Image (cartoon, rainbow, N blue to C red):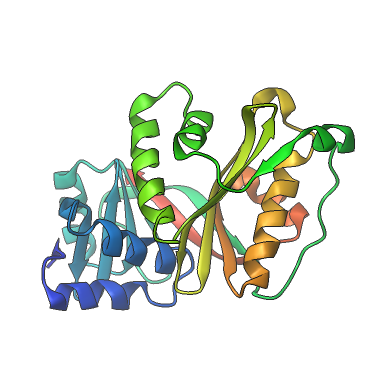
Amino acid sequence: MIAQVDTKRRRARFANACRGRWVLGAVLPLDLALFGKSQPWRFYAGPTLALEISGSTAWVAGHANPEELAGFLAFCGCESVILDEAGCLPPTGWHRAETLTVFGLAPGRALPLPAADEALWAQLDLDREPAAMDVARALYPEDTARQEDLYSELCTKRIRGKALVWTLRQGRKAVCTVGAYALANGQAYMACGQTESSLRGKGIGGRLIVQMANELSAEGQRPVFLCSPERVHFYTRLGFEKLGEYIRYVPS
């Protein structure tokens, strides 16, 4: 039975289901530790299941009864679910929407910095501790609700040393950003790499990603990414290793 994580036993089940899993093994346990009391409606467990609801998407580690999972997701209003198809049957009546690839970098390994527009790169300043709201506005310039959500979560994680975000500034403006938004269990989940549209295609985003990944790797962390199909070539070209796949399902 899928139930809210509100007891010691369910917390243990949640942790066991996440253990050893790329990305999910960092993101889900960290979110539960930081937000389990203030946002208990996000976290659920079954005998061999961990489930977190983030907006309209559910993240699943472990496995559950497909019919029960479908009913639960419908009750919660979820529009998609991300799961490991090798260990979890999809919810009954849902269909595969896309494959998400996990890329990573082994601890202690470093990748060569990729080529970039050197004249542009020389104009940019690396900000290793940008203001959280500057990051939120750079990522979601037209969506104040998402800005506020990211601001809140990023501040909570950074003050505990569980997130790292960098930006490149051109003057006072943040034009490129990337972050490790979950530093937990030996993994550094990197996400939200974004470059201002007018500067894309000049290599600065890829260089910033590799630079951060190399530093995290040198500290003994394993940088990991979860990327959509159109980004597979990008991470392959940068030199990251494919570690696995997750599948996003949506209701039929």
Q: Position of residue 237 (x, y in %)?
A: 77, 53
Vertical order, 229 against 10 (above or below)? above
Q: Position of residue 178 (x, y in %)?
A: 59, 46
Q: Quadrant of residue 182?
A: bottom left
Along the line of sight, the residue nearer the viewer: 27 or 208: 208
Q: Quadrant of residue 160?
A: bottom left
Q: Position of residue 152 (x, y in %)?
A: 34, 42
Residue at left offset 46%, top offset 40%:
132
Q: In the shown orientation, is residue 199 left or right of residue 12?
A: right
Residue at left offset 75%, top offset 54%:
238
Q: Quadrant of the N terminus?
A: bottom left
Q: In the shown orientation, is residue 202 left or right of residue 150?
A: right
Residue at left offset 20%, top offset 41%:
77
Q: Quadrant of the C terminus?
A: top left
Is residue 99 among what the camera can see?
Answer: yes
Vertical order, 111 against 132 (above or below)? below
Q: Position of residue 241 (x, y in %)?
A: 68, 66
Along the line of sight, the residue nearer the viewer: 3 or 174: 174
Along the line of sight, the residue nearer the viewer: 252 or 133: 133
Residue at left offset 82%, top offset 60%:
112
Is residue 85 among what the camera can see?
Answer: no
